[in-house]
Image (cartoon, rainbow, N blue to C red):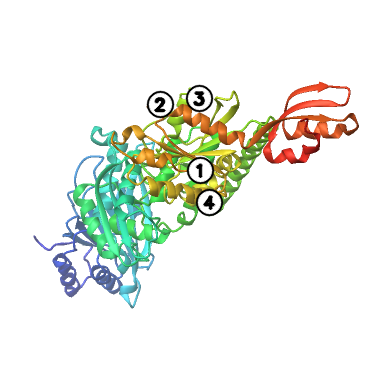
Amino acid sequence: MAKEIYGNLKGIRNSVIEELKTFYDLRLEFGQLVTAELGARMADVTDFINREVSVYISRSGQVLAVAVGDDQSVELPPIEGRRGSSRLSGVRCVHTHPNGNPALSGVDISALKNNRFDAMVAIGVAAPDFTQSTLTFGMITGIDQNEQYTVECYGPATLEQAEGIFFPNLAAMVERILDKQSGSASLAQGTERAILVGMEYGGSNTLWTAEDSLEELKQLADTAGAEVVQKFLQKRPKPDPAFFIGRGKVQELALYVQQENIDLCIFDDELSPAQQRNIEQAMGVRVLDRTALILDIFAQRARTNEGKLQVELAQLQYILPRIMGKGLSLSRLGGGIGTRGPGETKLEVDRRRIRDRIAYIKDCIGKVKSVRSLHRAGRAKANVPTVSLVGYTNAGKSTLLNTLTNSDIYAQDQLFATLDPTTRQLDLPNKQQAILTDTVGFIQRLPHQLVAAFQSTLEEVVEADVLLHVIDVSHELYKEQAASVYQVLDELGAKDKTIITVYNKIDKLPLDSALPARLAKEENSICISAKAGINLDALLELIAENLQMKSVEESFLIPYSDSAAVSRLHEAGTVLEQEYLAEGTLLKVRLEAEQVSEFEKYIKH
């Protein structure tokens, strides 16, 4: 191709023009936004002639045109880009600012929109060491309500940092967003294509293998609505502080993401803000970690006002250290997994407003907590025992509640199918009534933000008289799942409560399995099938037996001279019968077993 130099060449030496022509011989490696060499050479020429220099580069890394302007602007050469409002031109413009300021001007942004460049890159020339020049770049990131292109600018970054940006993925991602916003049928209803990344490293004390954990991450991604294209497992002695799985592996995945048209990369571990930012810059697609994925699922599942508040609180606490300095990240563009929920409108506000919002939500949840405390106090005064269902997500808690109480709450074979706690009346074989509460499911490495946010809900577990620990015995990792539940109960301070171990889904076991018979011999445990209705009567008997150990019915004869004891009995328990005799007041009371000793001298034998 002819090495033509466009623009205003008046007064420029032939040696400079020849130097500019050599830019055509430079070939950027696939994926590079700009090279440090090209940026420094452009800055050198700009400093010498005090004029802007522009280079137009294709996505393949080929230099298509070189142009020179005056000290304020540059003439655009005729560059043929791709057509279609949902497509970028396939060309990016890299130009210099002689004044050293790398910020994009109004003219730069107008040219970006009018030509639909993949990116507009501005290099602020730093003399005399041109390698220290910095740059910013702008990209079209969507279409607003007035059908005008929106632009976001990123940077500043050093030339060396810019080399690490895997640019084609960013451009492809923007085009998918434009395709959705312009109503393209091909992507309007499409699911997000995701890859999963796990890492096995030394020092892990978990019972789960990295493969097991990655498989569970796939279930979480499926629940969130993603299409999992591939899973990757990396082995390292320890996580890389900058890229978690290492720069080389990230670059390898960046190529895979480009080839397979991937929208999302999900990591099985919690990433630091810096790691997430570095990986997004290198890969050019949105990056989520396990915590963000679980938060997204919770955001989809929350139905009640309290649930939405709790999810928003957890989201904001997770976002707070990540909201500043996201740099070149495009992770919030276009919505999708990891961007949903009541907290999504707050993602771009500053730290102060987020902290204010967190304080407000905590106050609201505190009021809900007070209401819950009143309800619990009322039940305690009426001496109505409470039973809470706890267990790993998808263990069958909601199905069991529906079966035992003839309810119809949402229950599906998926992770975190129900989020908001549900309370129903439970009728026991001994004619006693109890309150049965279904709580949020647990999972290994349950995000600490969720445990903190759902404190008021999880207090139902702490205050319950008996816990039903529901275990999916058909799952090959049921022991590890049970251990994860006990770990969360320990964090809540509820591990020492009365626990009935309920081994559920025995109908899924082979007919000749000896496991149910062996598990049934364990203390305070039972094997059932909530869906098939197997052994539920025995479960109710076991619940009643455990509750009877918690409360008793006694008759007390209180002399009229000690009428204060009558008041104390009314406060301590439920008075079932009251009769006035010659020697005093006879009361039949149901109360906690440990409270009987306080009134022992009044017991009527």
Residue 409 appears anywhere in the view: no
Residue lying farthest bottom?
128
Q: Are marks 3 and 1 in contact (CB under 8 Å)?
A: no
Q: Are marks 3 and 2 in contact (CB under 8 Å)?
A: no
The numbered mark, 3 or 1, whose residue comes first in the sequence reads 1
Q: Classify 10 Å Cα crowding around label 2: few (below 14), some (14-19), many (20 and above).
A: some
Seen at 52% across and 42% down, the residue is 499
The numbered mark, 4 or 3, whose residue comes first in the sequence reads 3
Residue lying farthest left?
1
> Left or right of 163: which side holds 421?
right
Q: Which residue is mark 1?
A: 312
Q: Which mark is residue 405?
A: 3
> Left or right of 547: which side holds 600?
right
Q: Tell me which amino acid carries mark 1.
A: Glu
Q: Nearer the viewer, mark 4 or mark 1?
A: 4
Q: Which residue is mark 4?
A: 490
